[in-house]
Image (cartoon, grey):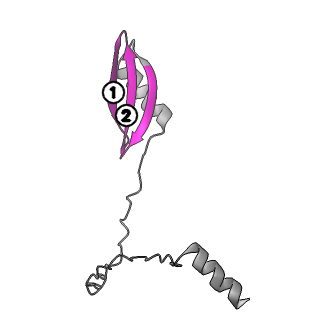
Amino acid sequence: MAALVIAMTMAVGPVTAQVRVQVQPKFQYQTLQPRQQKLQRQPRVQQQVKPRILMIPPSQAAQIAISQNPGAKLLSIKPKGNNYIATMRQGNQVFRVPIPGN
């Protein structure tokens, strides 16, 4: 067997080995900054919501708006603060009328 290996190497020529070299990239080291402490937030203070004090109902506010603007059509009435805002239309004009809620 050994004679066969020697005979084959003489017939083929010198045996060379192929070597693959893998080059790994160099690492770049970063300096880490120390963590900053989180700021302590003050507890949230809930805002006090003032209740709406509407003395008159929306239907009465609508009657007041119609009486102030005869010939106008009432489109909507919405509360805003202690007042009502009536949206009205007369001809091609749309306008808003404030109605006091008390």
The residue stretch that appears in magenta: 74-102
The amino acid type found where label 1 is placed reads Arg
Residue depicted at x 50% and y 32%: 59
Marks 1 and 2: CB-CB under 8 Å? yes
Q: Quadrant of residue 63?
A: top left
Q: Which residue is mark 2?
A: 85
Quadrant into which the C terminus falls: top left
Q: Which residue is mark 1?
A: 96
Give the residue at the far top of this rendering: 91
Q: Give the x, y percent position of residue 94.
A: 35, 19
State how many labels appear.
2
Q: Quadrant of residue 47?
A: bottom left
Residue depicted at x 64% and y 78%: 8
> Is residue 76 placed above or below 100 in the rendered structure?
above
> Is residue 76 placed above or below 79 in the rendered structure?
above
Closer to us: 48 or 43:
43
Q: Give the x, y percent position of residue 66.
A: 41, 21
Closer to us: 12 or 42:
12
The amino acid type found where label 2 is placed reads Ile
Specify few, some or many for label 1: CA neighbours under 10 Å numbering under 14, 14-19, or 20 or more: some
> Is residue 84 placed above or below 69 in the rendered structure?
below
Quadrant into which the N terminus falls: bottom right
Residue depicted at x 33% and y 22%: 95
Specify few, some or many for label 2: CA neighbours under 10 Å numbering under 14, 14-19, or 20 or more: many
Q: Is residue 79 magenta?
A: yes
Tag 2's secondary structure? strand
Q: Give the x, y percent position of residue 11.
A: 60, 75
Q: Give the x, y percent position of residue 90.
A: 37, 13
